[in-house]
Amino acid sequence: MVKLFYYILKRVSLSILVILGIIVVSYILVYIAPGNPAYTWVGKPTGPKAAEAIKLAEKDLGLDKPFYIQLYNFIKRFFSFDWGISIRFKQPVSVIVMRSLAATLELVVLAYIIALPLGILGGVYASLHRNSIADKTIYGIASLLASSPRFWIAAITVLLLQMFNINIFGRVSTSYAISINVYTGSYIIDSLLNGRIDAFIDAVLRAMPPVFLASLYPFALTTRIVRHALSEELHKEYVRQLLSYGLRGRHVIRRYALRGVIPVLAQIQGISFAYSVIDVATIENVFGREGIGVTLSKAILANDYPLIIGLLAIVSILFVIAITIADIIHMVIDPRVRI
Protein backbone atom coordinates (compact mmCIF):
# COMPACT_ATOMS: atom_id res chain seq x y z
CA MET A 1 0.00 0.00 0.00
CA VAL A 2 2.87 2.40 0.81
CA LYS A 3 4.53 1.70 -2.55
CA LEU A 4 1.18 2.28 -4.26
CA PHE A 5 0.76 5.66 -2.53
CA TYR A 6 4.27 6.84 -3.41
CA TYR A 7 3.90 5.68 -7.00
CA ILE A 8 0.65 7.63 -7.41
CA LEU A 9 2.19 10.66 -5.70
CA LYS A 10 5.20 10.52 -8.02
CA ARG A 11 3.08 10.19 -11.16
CA VAL A 12 0.77 13.04 -10.13
CA SER A 13 3.75 15.30 -9.29
CA LEU A 14 5.38 14.58 -12.64
CA SER A 15 2.08 15.23 -14.40
CA ILE A 16 1.76 18.65 -12.75
CA LEU A 17 5.30 19.54 -13.85
CA VAL A 18 4.54 18.42 -17.41
CA ILE A 19 1.34 20.50 -17.45
CA LEU A 20 3.26 23.53 -16.19
CA GLY A 21 5.89 23.06 -18.90
CA ILE A 22 3.19 22.73 -21.57
CA ILE A 23 1.56 25.98 -20.43
CA VAL A 24 4.90 27.82 -20.57
CA VAL A 25 5.82 26.46 -24.01
CA SER A 26 2.33 27.20 -25.38
CA TYR A 27 2.49 30.78 -24.13
CA ILE A 28 5.96 31.31 -25.61
CA LEU A 29 4.94 29.92 -29.03
CA VAL A 30 1.85 32.13 -29.18
CA TYR A 31 3.82 35.13 -27.90
CA ILE A 32 6.41 34.93 -30.69
CA ALA A 33 3.81 34.21 -33.40
CA PRO A 34 3.18 37.00 -35.94
CA GLY A 35 0.24 39.34 -35.46
CA ASN A 36 -0.95 41.72 -32.74
CA PRO A 37 -3.89 40.54 -30.59
CA ALA A 38 -4.57 44.13 -29.51
CA TYR A 39 -5.29 45.03 -33.15
CA THR A 40 -8.03 42.38 -33.26
CA TRP A 41 -9.32 43.32 -29.79
CA VAL A 42 -10.20 46.89 -30.85
CA GLY A 43 -11.80 45.77 -34.11
CA LYS A 44 -8.89 46.26 -36.54
CA PRO A 45 -9.05 50.07 -36.54
CA THR A 46 -7.79 52.37 -39.29
CA GLY A 47 -7.15 56.09 -39.38
CA PRO A 48 -5.14 58.57 -37.29
CA LYS A 49 -6.41 57.26 -33.95
CA ALA A 50 -5.65 53.62 -34.73
CA ALA A 51 -2.18 53.55 -33.16
CA GLU A 52 -3.49 55.15 -29.96
CA ALA A 53 -6.37 52.67 -29.75
CA ILE A 54 -4.01 49.73 -30.21
CA LYS A 55 -1.72 50.99 -27.44
CA LEU A 56 -4.67 51.34 -25.06
CA ALA A 57 -5.75 47.80 -25.96
CA GLU A 58 -2.24 46.49 -25.29
CA LYS A 59 -2.39 48.11 -21.84
CA ASP A 60 -5.81 46.59 -21.14
CA LEU A 61 -4.59 43.15 -22.22
CA GLY A 62 -1.33 43.47 -20.27
CA LEU A 63 0.77 43.24 -23.42
CA ASP A 64 2.73 46.37 -22.54
CA LYS A 65 4.48 44.59 -19.67
CA PRO A 66 7.76 42.63 -20.02
CA PHE A 67 7.42 39.06 -21.24
CA TYR A 68 8.37 37.39 -17.94
CA ILE A 69 5.72 39.41 -16.09
CA GLN A 70 3.10 38.45 -18.68
CA LEU A 71 4.08 34.79 -18.32
CA TYR A 72 4.00 34.92 -14.52
CA ASN A 73 0.59 36.61 -14.48
CA PHE A 74 -0.79 34.11 -16.96
CA ILE A 75 0.39 31.07 -14.97
CA LYS A 76 -1.02 32.56 -11.76
CA ARG A 77 -4.39 33.24 -13.41
CA PHE A 78 -4.42 29.89 -15.16
CA PHE A 79 -4.32 27.84 -11.96
CA SER A 80 -7.05 30.07 -10.48
CA PHE A 81 -9.18 29.29 -13.56
CA ASP A 82 -9.03 32.91 -14.72
CA TRP A 83 -7.87 32.47 -18.31
CA GLY A 84 -8.76 35.95 -19.51
CA ILE A 85 -11.23 37.15 -22.13
CA SER A 86 -11.42 35.80 -25.67
CA ILE A 87 -10.39 38.45 -28.18
CA ARG A 88 -12.71 37.09 -30.87
CA PHE A 89 -15.76 36.05 -28.85
CA LYS A 90 -15.49 38.66 -26.05
CA GLN A 91 -16.36 35.95 -23.50
CA PRO A 92 -14.34 34.35 -20.68
CA VAL A 93 -11.88 31.86 -22.17
CA SER A 94 -12.68 29.28 -19.48
CA VAL A 95 -16.36 29.30 -20.49
CA ILE A 96 -15.57 28.83 -24.19
CA VAL A 97 -12.99 26.11 -23.50
CA MET A 98 -15.31 24.12 -21.23
CA ARG A 99 -18.15 24.42 -23.74
CA SER A 100 -15.90 23.21 -26.56
CA LEU A 101 -14.45 20.44 -24.40
CA ALA A 102 -17.93 19.14 -23.55
CA ALA A 103 -18.77 18.91 -27.26
CA THR A 104 -15.54 17.05 -28.04
CA LEU A 105 -15.77 14.66 -25.10
CA GLU A 106 -19.36 13.89 -26.11
CA LEU A 107 -18.04 12.31 -29.31
CA VAL A 108 -15.00 10.68 -27.70
CA VAL A 109 -16.98 8.99 -24.91
CA LEU A 110 -19.68 7.72 -27.30
CA ALA A 111 -16.98 6.47 -29.66
CA TYR A 112 -15.33 4.46 -26.88
CA ILE A 113 -18.65 3.02 -25.72
CA ILE A 114 -18.93 1.54 -29.21
CA ALA A 115 -15.27 0.78 -29.95
CA LEU A 116 -14.12 -1.01 -26.78
CA PRO A 117 -16.69 -3.86 -26.65
CA LEU A 118 -16.50 -4.46 -30.40
CA GLY A 119 -12.70 -4.27 -30.36
CA ILE A 120 -12.44 -6.79 -27.52
CA LEU A 121 -14.86 -9.17 -29.22
CA GLY A 122 -13.01 -8.85 -32.52
CA GLY A 123 -9.64 -9.40 -30.88
CA VAL A 124 -10.83 -12.45 -28.95
CA TYR A 125 -12.43 -14.01 -32.02
CA ALA A 126 -9.32 -13.42 -34.14
CA SER A 127 -7.07 -14.84 -31.43
CA LEU A 128 -9.16 -18.01 -31.08
CA HIS A 129 -9.06 -18.51 -34.86
CA ARG A 130 -5.41 -17.61 -35.40
CA ASN A 131 -4.16 -17.79 -39.01
CA SER A 132 -7.65 -18.54 -40.33
CA ILE A 133 -9.38 -16.52 -43.06
CA ALA A 134 -11.49 -14.78 -40.40
CA ASP A 135 -8.38 -13.84 -38.42
CA LYS A 136 -6.58 -12.45 -41.46
CA THR A 137 -9.69 -10.52 -42.48
CA ILE A 138 -10.19 -8.98 -39.04
CA TYR A 139 -6.50 -8.14 -38.70
CA GLY A 140 -6.39 -6.62 -42.19
CA ILE A 141 -9.45 -4.45 -41.56
CA ALA A 142 -8.08 -3.33 -38.17
CA SER A 143 -4.72 -2.44 -39.70
CA LEU A 144 -6.39 -0.48 -42.49
CA LEU A 145 -8.64 1.44 -40.10
CA ALA A 146 -5.78 2.22 -37.71
CA SER A 147 -3.63 3.76 -40.46
CA SER A 148 -6.26 5.53 -42.59
CA PRO A 149 -6.73 9.32 -42.10
CA ARG A 150 -10.05 9.95 -40.39
CA PHE A 151 -10.45 13.48 -41.79
CA TRP A 152 -10.32 12.05 -45.32
CA ILE A 153 -12.92 9.40 -44.46
CA ALA A 154 -15.03 12.13 -42.81
CA ALA A 155 -14.91 14.27 -45.97
CA ILE A 156 -15.96 11.29 -48.11
CA THR A 157 -18.78 10.51 -45.65
CA VAL A 158 -20.09 14.07 -45.81
CA LEU A 159 -20.07 14.00 -49.63
CA LEU A 160 -21.97 10.70 -49.67
CA LEU A 161 -24.56 11.97 -47.20
CA GLN A 162 -25.06 15.16 -49.22
CA MET A 163 -25.70 13.07 -52.32
CA PHE A 164 -28.78 11.73 -50.50
CA ASN A 165 -29.71 15.21 -49.17
CA ILE A 166 -28.98 14.20 -45.59
CA ASN A 167 -28.08 17.21 -43.42
CA ILE A 168 -25.98 16.21 -40.42
CA PHE A 169 -24.02 19.43 -39.86
CA GLY A 170 -23.85 20.88 -36.38
CA ARG A 171 -24.60 19.30 -33.02
CA VAL A 172 -28.34 19.97 -32.95
CA SER A 173 -30.94 21.90 -34.91
CA THR A 174 -30.92 25.67 -34.26
CA SER A 175 -34.54 25.60 -33.07
CA TYR A 176 -33.69 22.98 -30.46
CA ALA A 177 -30.45 24.72 -29.41
CA ILE A 178 -32.27 27.91 -28.39
CA SER A 179 -35.20 26.15 -26.73
CA ILE A 180 -33.44 23.84 -24.23
CA ASN A 181 -31.54 24.78 -21.11
CA VAL A 182 -27.84 23.84 -21.24
CA TYR A 183 -26.50 22.15 -18.09
CA THR A 184 -23.60 19.92 -19.12
CA GLY A 185 -22.70 21.23 -22.59
CA SER A 186 -23.74 17.92 -24.17
CA TYR A 187 -26.98 18.34 -26.13
CA ILE A 188 -27.63 14.60 -25.90
CA ILE A 189 -27.64 14.73 -22.09
CA ASP A 190 -29.19 18.21 -21.78
CA SER A 191 -32.10 17.30 -24.06
CA LEU A 192 -32.94 14.39 -21.76
CA LEU A 193 -32.63 16.61 -18.68
CA ASN A 194 -35.09 19.01 -20.35
CA GLY A 195 -37.44 16.15 -21.21
CA ARG A 196 -37.12 16.91 -24.93
CA ILE A 197 -37.13 13.56 -26.71
CA ASP A 198 -37.37 15.30 -30.10
CA ALA A 199 -34.17 17.25 -29.41
CA PHE A 200 -32.50 14.08 -28.09
CA ILE A 201 -33.28 12.17 -31.31
CA ASP A 202 -32.00 15.06 -33.43
CA ALA A 203 -28.75 15.31 -31.43
CA VAL A 204 -28.16 11.54 -31.59
CA LEU A 205 -28.79 11.36 -35.35
CA ARG A 206 -26.35 14.22 -35.96
CA ALA A 207 -23.76 12.60 -33.68
CA MET A 208 -23.91 9.13 -35.24
CA PRO A 209 -21.66 9.75 -38.33
CA PRO A 210 -18.83 11.53 -36.45
CA VAL A 211 -19.08 9.06 -33.55
CA PHE A 212 -18.75 6.15 -35.98
CA LEU A 213 -15.67 7.74 -37.57
CA ALA A 214 -14.15 8.55 -34.17
CA SER A 215 -14.60 4.94 -33.06
CA LEU A 216 -12.57 3.51 -35.96
CA TYR A 217 -9.14 4.08 -34.44
CA PRO A 218 -9.85 2.81 -30.87
CA PHE A 219 -11.71 -0.18 -32.34
CA ALA A 220 -8.80 -1.07 -34.62
CA LEU A 221 -6.19 -0.57 -31.89
CA THR A 222 -8.16 -2.57 -29.31
CA THR A 223 -8.71 -5.42 -31.77
CA ARG A 224 -5.01 -5.69 -32.60
CA ILE A 225 -3.86 -5.42 -28.97
CA VAL A 226 -6.34 -8.03 -27.68
CA ARG A 227 -5.56 -10.40 -30.56
CA HIS A 228 -1.81 -10.25 -29.90
CA ALA A 229 -1.95 -10.28 -26.09
CA LEU A 230 -4.54 -13.05 -25.84
CA SER A 231 -2.63 -15.22 -28.31
CA GLU A 232 0.42 -14.98 -26.05
CA GLU A 233 -1.65 -15.81 -22.95
CA LEU A 234 -3.19 -18.88 -24.58
CA HIS A 235 0.28 -20.33 -25.20
CA LYS A 236 1.38 -19.98 -21.58
CA GLU A 237 1.81 -23.00 -19.33
CA TYR A 238 -0.90 -22.10 -16.80
CA VAL A 239 -3.57 -22.17 -19.54
CA ARG A 240 -2.52 -25.67 -20.60
CA GLN A 241 -2.60 -26.85 -17.00
CA LEU A 242 -6.10 -25.45 -16.45
CA LEU A 243 -7.33 -27.17 -19.59
CA SER A 244 -5.70 -30.42 -18.48
CA TYR A 245 -7.70 -30.20 -15.22
CA GLY A 246 -10.87 -30.49 -17.27
CA LEU A 247 -11.96 -26.84 -17.21
CA ARG A 248 -13.95 -25.65 -20.20
CA GLY A 249 -12.05 -23.54 -22.73
CA ARG A 250 -14.50 -20.63 -22.57
CA HIS A 251 -14.25 -20.56 -18.80
CA VAL A 252 -10.45 -20.51 -18.90
CA ILE A 253 -10.40 -17.72 -21.46
CA ARG A 254 -13.02 -15.57 -19.72
CA ARG A 255 -11.86 -16.15 -16.14
CA TYR A 256 -8.07 -16.36 -16.51
CA ALA A 257 -6.58 -15.62 -19.94
CA LEU A 258 -8.43 -12.32 -20.47
CA ARG A 259 -7.16 -11.07 -17.10
CA GLY A 260 -3.64 -11.22 -18.47
CA VAL A 261 -4.71 -8.95 -21.33
CA ILE A 262 -6.20 -6.22 -19.11
CA PRO A 263 -2.90 -4.57 -17.99
CA VAL A 264 -1.65 -4.12 -21.56
CA LEU A 265 -5.06 -3.00 -22.76
CA ALA A 266 -5.43 -0.46 -19.93
CA GLN A 267 -2.03 1.07 -20.62
CA ILE A 268 -2.66 1.41 -24.35
CA GLN A 269 -6.12 2.93 -23.88
CA GLY A 270 -4.65 5.96 -22.11
CA ILE A 271 -2.60 6.88 -25.17
CA SER A 272 -5.47 5.93 -27.47
CA PHE A 273 -7.95 8.14 -25.60
CA ALA A 274 -5.59 11.10 -25.71
CA TYR A 275 -5.01 10.60 -29.44
CA SER A 276 -8.77 10.30 -30.05
CA VAL A 277 -9.30 13.81 -28.68
CA ILE A 278 -7.12 15.18 -31.51
CA ASP A 279 -8.75 12.79 -33.96
CA VAL A 280 -12.20 14.05 -33.00
CA ALA A 281 -11.04 17.67 -33.30
CA THR A 282 -10.29 17.13 -36.99
CA ILE A 283 -13.58 15.28 -37.57
CA GLU A 284 -15.50 18.14 -35.94
CA ASN A 285 -14.18 20.59 -38.51
CA VAL A 286 -15.57 18.47 -41.34
CA PHE A 287 -19.00 18.10 -39.71
CA GLY A 288 -19.19 21.70 -38.47
CA ARG A 289 -19.57 20.78 -34.80
CA GLU A 290 -18.58 23.48 -32.29
CA GLY A 291 -15.91 21.50 -30.46
CA ILE A 292 -12.24 22.06 -29.72
CA GLY A 293 -11.22 21.70 -33.37
CA VAL A 294 -13.63 24.32 -34.77
CA THR A 295 -13.02 26.73 -31.89
CA LEU A 296 -9.24 26.45 -32.25
CA SER A 297 -9.46 27.14 -36.00
CA LYS A 298 -11.47 30.31 -35.36
CA ALA A 299 -9.09 31.39 -32.59
CA ILE A 300 -6.02 30.98 -34.82
CA LEU A 301 -7.60 32.97 -37.67
CA ALA A 302 -8.46 35.79 -35.24
CA ASN A 303 -5.06 35.69 -33.50
CA ASP A 304 -6.98 35.13 -30.26
CA TYR A 305 -3.97 34.23 -28.11
CA PRO A 306 -5.81 33.78 -24.75
CA LEU A 307 -8.20 31.28 -26.34
CA ILE A 308 -5.45 29.52 -28.31
CA ILE A 309 -3.38 29.00 -25.15
CA GLY A 310 -6.45 27.85 -23.21
CA LEU A 311 -7.40 25.28 -25.85
CA LEU A 312 -3.84 23.99 -26.27
CA ALA A 313 -3.46 23.76 -22.50
CA ILE A 314 -6.72 21.85 -21.95
CA VAL A 315 -5.92 19.35 -24.73
CA SER A 316 -2.44 18.82 -23.27
CA ILE A 317 -3.88 18.39 -19.79
CA LEU A 318 -6.27 15.75 -21.15
CA PHE A 319 -3.27 13.94 -22.65
CA VAL A 320 -1.40 13.97 -19.35
CA ILE A 321 -4.43 12.99 -17.24
CA ALA A 322 -5.42 10.12 -19.56
CA ILE A 323 -1.90 8.66 -19.65
CA THR A 324 -1.42 9.13 -15.89
CA ILE A 325 -4.70 7.36 -15.06
CA ALA A 326 -3.80 4.54 -17.46
CA ASP A 327 -0.39 4.13 -15.80
CA ILE A 328 -1.94 4.05 -12.33
CA ILE A 329 -4.54 1.48 -13.39
CA HIS A 330 -1.80 -0.60 -15.00
CA MET A 331 0.22 -0.45 -11.82
CA VAL A 332 -2.76 -1.43 -9.64
CA ILE A 333 -3.60 -4.39 -11.88
CA ASP A 334 0.02 -5.49 -12.41
CA PRO A 335 2.06 -5.22 -9.16
CA ARG A 336 5.27 -5.88 -11.12
CA VAL A 337 5.22 -2.23 -12.21
CA ARG A 338 5.90 -1.13 -8.62
CA ILE A 339 9.20 -3.01 -8.49
Image: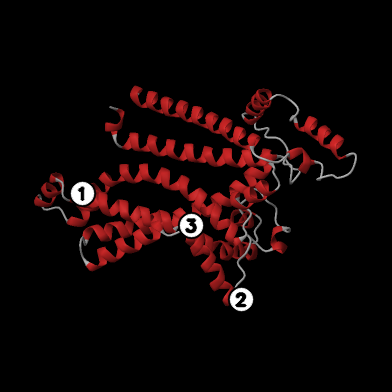
Q: In the drawing, does residue 14 fall left or right of residue 180?
A: left
Instruction: Report the front residue among 131 and 200.
Output: 131
Towards the viewer: 326 or 148: 148
Q: Which residue is outermost to the bottom? A: 164
Question: Along the horizontal axis of the image, is 296 left or right of 250?
Answer: right
**Which residue corresponds to mark 3?**
214
Q: Residue at x 61, y 42 (%)?
A: 311
Tag 1 residue: 232
Examine the rendering and report whether any part of residue 329 can be seen. Answer: yes
- Counting other residues with Cα less than 10 Å from the Cα at mark 1, is it few (<14), some (14-19), or many (20 or more)? some
Residue at position x 21%, y 56% in the image: 250
Where residue 44 sits, quadrant-wise, is: top right
Q: Which residue is mark 2?
A: 165
| Amino acid carrying mark 2 in the image | Asn
Q: Residue at x 68, y 38 (%)?
A: 306
How far apart marks 1 and 3 lie (CA) works out to 29 Å
Q: Earlier in the sequence, mark 1 or mark 3?
A: 3
Q: How is the image coloured?
A: secondary structure
In front of the other: 112 or 224: 224
Q: Secondary structure at mark 2?
A: loop
User: What percent of the width, then of the height, locates residue 221?
Assistant: 36, 53
Q: Which quarter of the image is occupied by the N terminus?
A: top left
- Residue 167: give x, y in percent of width and height: 62, 70
User: Quadrant of residue 119 in the image?
Assistant: bottom left
Q: Which element is circle 3 on? A: helix
Q: Secondary structure at mark 1?
A: helix
Q: Amino acid at mark 3?
A: Ala
In the displayed image of the protein, which residue is found farthest to the right? 48
Q: Is residue 184 in sight in this rendering?
A: no
Height in image: 302 above or below 124? above
